[in-house]
Amino acid sequence: AGKLPRPTSPRIITVANQKGGVGKTTTAVNIAAALALHSLGVLVVDLDPQGNASTALGIDHRSPDIDSVYELLLGEVELRDTIQRSPNNENLYCVPATLDLAGAEIELVSMVARENRLRNAINGDLLAELGIDYVLIDCPPSLGLLTVNAMVAAREVLIPIQCEYYALEGVGQLLRNIELVQAHLNPALHVSTIVLTMYDGRTKLADQVAEEVRNHFGDRVLSTVIPRSVKVSEAPGYAMTIIEYDPGSRGAMSYLDAGRELAMRAHREENSSNRVGEAQ
Ligand code: ADP
Ligand code: MG
């Protein structure tokens, strides 16, 4: 594994798309594992009550005793209490999600600074202490308060787009929400990266979708395209990402390439002042 540049301050990236099943979680955990394999420190914040990202990283999120992102958002615990190290890679950490989180969407409504809770909880000193270079936030399939919290906490949005019919359906609404958050809550927020997922080279449609997305988003679309592969979908069943489950597979190679591309683009992202832990 060649060396990848380390960003001067942690890059906080929200993986969002309100459509379910487009590859948000798969992309978040596999890019995280790819970066960690290159000795970069990575924290995945699981913001989906299903906890699929936690599972893929080998983190137990079913135990009633763990402190999860739910307690973190409610302000009952600190980031340090919730972070677990992945058994798969010592550079990989996770703040797990539990099913309680499903209620948070409603419980947060009446809370002070309800949109800023994740941002305020992400402690820059702790990230530095653990050597974390990347924070990837895996969003639920909605544009509710959890996703808004993710957008306020991050500087970058990564949008996975499935190479399928209606690929761009809903993306306009997502972009409008990002603009609203940028206008009112987080001026530094922007769409930095698009990842094309579940590409099936045998279909003409996949190429048409890829072309349409590239026309629309230009060089923000990674040149690496993630192929559809059964192995990618099998890996979480073994509490792994494809990077550990089958390192030589096309799926693993594509996520390693995607991680490398993302890291090499870091220089574009360095010129902003939106530092972790800084007040709004
Ligand atoms: P989301 O988080 O957007 O809901 P997921 O990452 O959970 O989407 O992916 C939806 C389903 O598609 C999951 O069952 C996942 O394993 C599968 N999947 C994701 N990426 C691929 C891929 N490249 N090839 C095959 N199956 C995939
Ligand atoms: Mg998901």
Image (cartoon, rainbow, N blue to C red):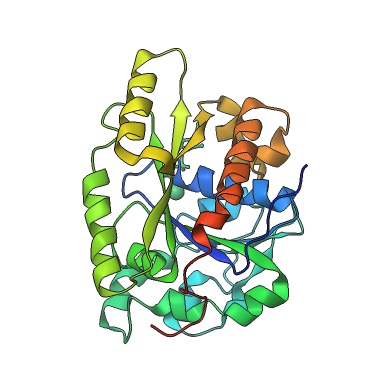
Using the rendered image of the protein, determine whether residue 22 is visible from the camera's viewpoint.
no
For the N terminus, the image quarter is: top right
Q: Taking 203 as reference, is 241 left or right?
A: right
Residue at 73 percent of width and 48 percent of height: 37
Say which quarter of the image contains residue 118: bottom left
For the C terminus, the image quarter is: bottom left
Q: Taking 217 as reference, is 232 left or right?
A: right
| Residue 106 vertical placement versus 268 (above, below) | below
Residue at 33 percent of width and 70 percent of height: 187
Camera-side residue of 96 and 208: 208
Q: Position of residue 199 (x, y in %)?
A: 46, 25
Camera-side residue of 184 and 5: 5
Q: How many labels were placed on the picture?
A: 0
Say which quarter of the image contains residue 252: top right
Using the rendered image of the protein, determine whether residue 245 is visible from the camera's viewpoint.
yes
Q: Position of residue 179 (x, y in %)?
A: 25, 61
Q: Taking 107 as reference, is 8 left or right?
A: right
Q: Position of residue 144 (x, y in %)?
A: 28, 63
Q: Position of residue 64 (x, y in %)?
A: 57, 70
| Residue 232 vertical placement versus 69 (above, below) | above
Camera-side residue of 64 and 129: 129
Q: Taking 33 as reference, is 214 left or right?
A: left
Residue at 64 percent of width and 58 percent of height: 59
